[in-house]
Amino acid sequence: MKQSSFKKIDFFILVFILFIALLLRLYKFNIPLADLHSWRQADTAAVARNFVKNGFDLTHPRYDDLSNVQSGLENPQGYRMVEFPLYNAFFAYTYKLIPSIPIEQWGRLVSITFSLLTISVIYFLVLKEKDRMTAFFSGFIYAVFPFFVFFSRVVLPESTALGFTFLAIFFLYLRPTKYSILNTLFYMLSLLFFASALLIKPTVIFFSLPLAYLFFQSDKTKFLKKPFFYFYFALSVIPLFWWRNYIKAFPEGIPVNEWLITSVNTGGGLQKIFLRPAFFRWVFFERINNLILGGFSTVFLILGILSKQKKYLFLTILLSSLVYLFVFEGGNVQHEYYQTLILPSLAIFSALGISFLIENRKFVSPFFSFFMIPILLAFSWFFSFYQVKNYYNHSQELVQEAKILASLTQPEDKIVTDRMGDTTLLYLAQRHGAPAFYREPESLQEFGYQYLITSSQEAIEKLKNRNYKLVFENDKFSLFKL
């Protein structure tokens, strides 16, 4: 099939899609950082806030948790040694420039911006490889479906890493086959973006497959004989290897993460889920079918995968997503935000399925194509939104508790909360401390903690019996001085 060129009409279509996408991502934009996965968002935002307070030392990112809850080791400096903090530095710097907008809202804006870049690249690639109609549906699905929207505006690094990854694919796709200055420029830009994506979120390494395919597409089998192919991936991963080796010197700042591959945390402790029926049920039925695609649109996804459209670039993106799902089974079952990285393949292949139905009029009537497809998409959107709308909910009581805690303590005071490892309260109160009672009160006092806040009646009675000073009490929680 002859490739479609990007014309003026595509500019207007893409602007329309991006405008709708932006409007939807601004829904409840100014709510406190206490929505779904607020514990993970708070950790990310705290690193940025500490950059603003203490200076941009990217090699020593710090957050609000000083305990041993995440790593098993005491972490008095609050080191947060996970992804290289490029994303955090982005929105910390923008906050420094325009402090009138809260820092967590800057974090959302950065995520939104990179999600719009991802939509733009997907539209362009599908237009070039397939046609305008499929490009529209792929961009439209990514722009408006509720799960896509929510996880494109959270304060997490996935959206930014995905944006950098698709920019890397975009420039390698555009690279001329013959050697030229433009060839070198696009090669270097792609390499830079992919290296940055790996630093921000190492799991995007699975997108090496479409990148490798683009080398094959330009040089066929000769690409294995060309050093630029090997230089590209070697130079891309060197910063990541450096960072992963560097953080080994700070084990107290590295959360326990081995479980992400094979297990999930439950009320009964870690449970193996690797290749178990529960994995397939949760990821493919509950998440992809029900939550992300709203049930009805799954038929489009399946048709897109099964239809005989030899778009190998898209197949490598799909394969990257599948390999990622099967490698990080524990993480994908435990946390919804892990599915952010598979959203491009879901949007692309759902759009391919819609195009298949529209184009094959011998098998599907025009009535179904032009009447039923919009209805199925609408039903899918509403069923997905029915679940995702709860992700925006946040506890006003928690926000009020944070305000009271901040008013009764000093910024330098170290606080202990009973949040079971959740740092949201610490973040909202702008305090450092421990997000769980991980030691007895006497030991916590020895480690320099000044206050303890709890809503547990058992803990309250215990602290009162030990004659700890009660600073504040209402029907929701009590604050004690240690």
Image: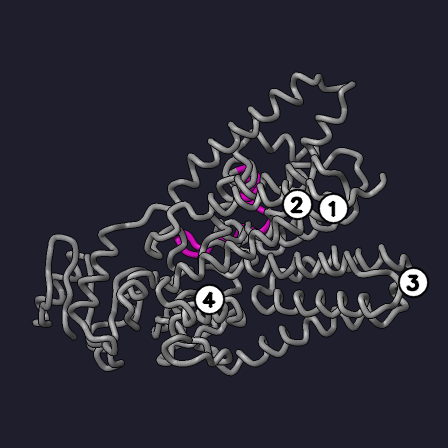
Label 3 to label 1: alpha-carbon separation: 29 Å
Q: Which residue is mark 1?
A: 6
Label 1 to label 2: alpha-carbon separation: 8 Å
Q: Return the x and y of residue 246 as percentages of the image width and height.
A: 56, 81
Amino acid at the residue labelled 3: Lys
- 132 on left or right of 36: right
Circle 2: is it few (<14), some (14-19), or many (20+) Cα within 10 Å?
A: few
Circle 4: is it few (<14), some (14-19), or many (20+) Cα within 10 Å?
A: many
Above/below status of 326 relative to 135? below
Label 2 to label 3: alpha-carbon separation: 36 Å
Label 4 or label 1, whichever comes before in sequence order: 1
| Residue 222: mark in rendering | 3
Question: Which is in the foreground here, disc 4 or disc 1?
Answer: 1
The picture quadrant where one finds residue 364 is top right
Label 2 or label 3, whichever comes before in sequence order: 2
Of 12 and 464, nearer the camera is 12
Above/below status of 151 relative to 364? below
| Residue 91: mark in rendering | 4
Amino acid at the residue labelled 1: Phe
Of 179 and 239, nearer the camera is 179
Q: Which residue is mark 2?
A: 11
| Cβ atoms at labels 1 and 2 below 8 Å apart | yes
| Cβ atoms at labels 2 and 3 below 8 Å apart | no
